[in-house]
Every structure is written in C-alpha cells, then in structure tokens.
Amino acid sequence: MSLSIAIALHILSAVVWVGGMFFAYMALRPVAASQLEPPVRLSLWAGVFGKFFPWVWLSILVLIGSGYMMIFKLYQTMNASPLYILIMMILGFIMMLIFLHVFFGPYRRLKQAVAAEDWPMGGSKLAQIRMLTGINTLIGLAVVAIAAGGRYLV
C-alpha cells in the first residue's frame, strides 16, 4: 500500500511542477507579453511565482522522498536500480538545481526590482527566469517521457 501511495504522490508532484512550468511558459507568458505593459507584466509574474514556487518546493520534497522510497522498496539499493531510474534521478536533481538558482537569484532580484519599480532590471531578471524555465520545462518533459517508457527500453 505504501508503494502505491509513493507512486501516486510522485506522479502528482511531477505533474504539478512540470505542468505548471509548461502552462506558464507556453500559455501565460506569450499572452502576458503581448497584452501587458512592463510594470503590470512584471508585477503579474512576481505574483504568479509567489503562488507557484511554494508548490514547487513541496513537489521537490515529495519527489525526493517518494523517489527514494520507491527505489529502496523496489530495488533495495541504488546500484540495483535500472538505468532509466538513475537517469530520471540525475535529471530531476539538475532541475532542482536550476530551480534553486532561479529562486535565490533572478526571482529574488525580480521581486526587488518590482518593489523598487525598476522595470528594466525586472525585465532582465524575468528574461533569465524565462530562459531557465524553458530549459527546466524541456528537461521535465524528457523525465516524464523516460518515466512513461523507460522500462520498455531494451
């Protein structure tokens, strides 16, 4: 039973994180860029990230906990894990490092720029976040594909 719960929580956490990035990058970003002036757009993004990033933190904690639980329940050791599991884990940690950089770097400076109404600085920080989120979205989609089909590779 605990394995089923771990799998469900793991998948839900991945959906929240990767799905949220995909929505923000592919749907919200283009509309906000085409319809909102910089002060409104940058304030919107600072607010959106303020609501989304706590969910990312929670997702990361659940992904790490449930991931290791599944590895040790199913394979007993990391060495016994199939290659696709190890690839997912490595890519997941790369995603986490990118998120940590975004959170403690450009996002922190975006909030400061919005508070100071420094729109050029805010725009440059948002551009950094956009690039890193694009990379993380692609990695996240690759992880989802590996999760779905990895066990079937020969």
Image (cartoon, helix red, strand yellow):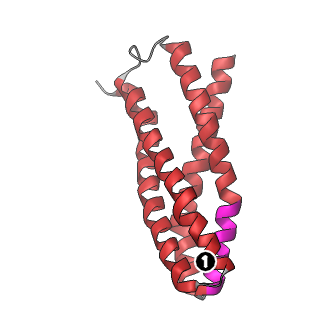
Q: Secondary structure at mark 1?
A: helix
| Left or right: residue 40 compared with residue 85 | right
Q: In the figure, 111 relative to 67: above or below?
A: below
Q: For the point 41% across and 18% down, which residue is it?
A: 81
Q: Quadrant of the N terminus?
A: top right
Q: Which amino acid type is shown beneath numbered disc 1?
A: Ala
| Left or right: residue 11 compared with residue 75 | right
| Left or right: residue 104 compared with residue 5 | left
Q: How far across and down, in percent of the image, does residue 91 sit? A: 41, 40
Residue 43 drawn in magenta: yes
Q: For the point 59% across and 45% down, which residue is it?
A: 15
Residue 118 drawn in magenta: no
**Residue numbers of the magenta segment:** 39-50
Q: For the point 35% across and 25% down, which residue is it?
A: 83
Q: In the figure, 51 relative to 127: above or below?
A: above
Q: Residues within 10 Å of mark 1 (few under 14, many from 20)?
A: many
| Left or right: residue 13 compared with residue 30 | right
Q: How far across and down, in percent of the image, does residue 19 sit? A: 57, 53
Q: Quadrant of residue 115 in the image?
A: bottom right
Residue on which disc 1 sits: 113
Q: Quadrant of the C terminus?
A: top left
Q: How far across and down, in percent of the image, does residue 93 sit? A: 46, 39
Q: Quadrant of residue 79 in the image?
A: top left
Q: How far across and down, in percent of the image, does residue 85 sit? A: 42, 27
Query: Residue farthest to the left?
Result: 154
Query: Residue farthest to the top?
Result: 76
